[in-house]
Image (cartoon, rainbow, N blue to C red):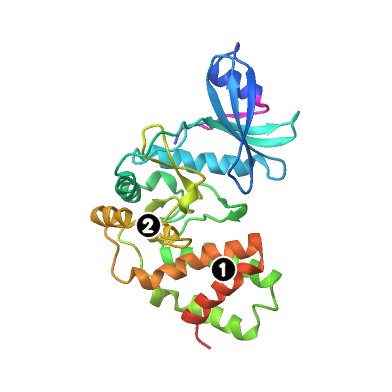
Amino acid sequence: MGDLFRCSSLEEGIRQVFGEGVSITGNRAVTGGDINEAMCLTLSNGERVFVKCNRLKGEDFFRAEAIGLGAIRATNTIKTPLVYCYGFDENRNYSFLMMDMVIASTKIKDYYIQLGVELAALHKAKTEEFVTDGIYGFVEDNFIGSTRQINAGCDSWIDFFRSFRLEPQLRMATRHYAKEFDKRLMRKVNSLLDRLPDILIEPEFPSLVHGDLWAGNHIVGSNGKAWLIDPAAYVGHSEVDIAMTELFGRFPEEFYRAYNSMNHLESGYSDRRNIYNLYQILNHVNLFGTSYIPSAVDIIEHYGRD
């Protein structure tokens, strides 16, 4: 995945990447993110760089994103922005991530077909270098949104998903919303967790997944194709990415046809989809509040038993 460069200011990062004589000549705010501020810096050599910054999150937040982008990039399957450096700028009092500025082009005619093909290739890429212990997990913990995501190594996908995806989110949700997660619902929660081996399946092979693949996390790149951004990457089951594409409105149908032609979804996927998306919905509960609780309860009621 390559070495990550940590620096103590934006200026240091620019000098290290572009040379001693290069400086910042312009700064333009970029909109679109929910968690971070973003800007486009114009440099004295005519280059532009994209910077994400956050006063509340530490530099480990951006280090994790950089590692995820680097992992996807290392598979040579689908484009991601090139990361230059990350760090904490003491003068500006924020952590930051600096990467190349992706200049959007016009979508190619078969944009979603190509996205499906390239995502399938990502999911079929070798994963050994991305896990340090076990088959599933990742080289480091990272974040889903602003929630820490545990990526401890595990030899069973079902055990990994239960222990490091559903259970941590459920603990947070039930701690903060004990009234909504009453005793009766918790019986169903425990039943659902016990029944996971009957609902989920072990994949044919482990896949590097983006981990947060909704419509806002792919952008049109300079080549007119899809580029992936803002990953919550880890090695898991490819179905979690496909499930996420359906959570907030499906991608166009040609995406699914193209993906399925390259990496066929196993029988019963539609029965597993909502279990995978329960993780994402619970994270939204924990980040954004009670408006997402009814969706989580519907899934728990469907799969749990009294």
Query: Label 1 belongs to which residue?
Result: 167
Residue 95 on image: x %, y %: 67, 37
Q: Which dot, 1 or 2, sits closer to the camera? A: 2
Magenta stretch, residue numbers: 2-10
The answer to whether residue 24 is above or below residue 97 is above
**The image quarter in which residue 282 lies:** bottom right
Q: Residue furthest bottom?
A: 306
Q: Amino acid at mark 2?
A: Ser
Q: Is residue 239 left or right of residue 232?
A: left
Observer-nearest of 254 and 13: 254
Q: Residue at x 53, y 47 (%)?
A: 140
Q: CA distance from mark 1 to mark 2?
A: 20 Å
Q: Cβ–Cβ below 8 Å for labels 1 and 2?
A: no
Visible in this render: residue 168?
Answer: no
Observer-nearest of 133 and 123: 123
**The image quarter in which residue 154 lies:** bottom left
Q: Which mark is residue 238?
A: 2
Q: Residue at x 52, y 54 (%)?
A: 151
Q: Residue furthest left?
A: 261
The answer to whether residue 247 is above or below residue 216 is below
Residue 188 on image: x %, y %: 54, 82
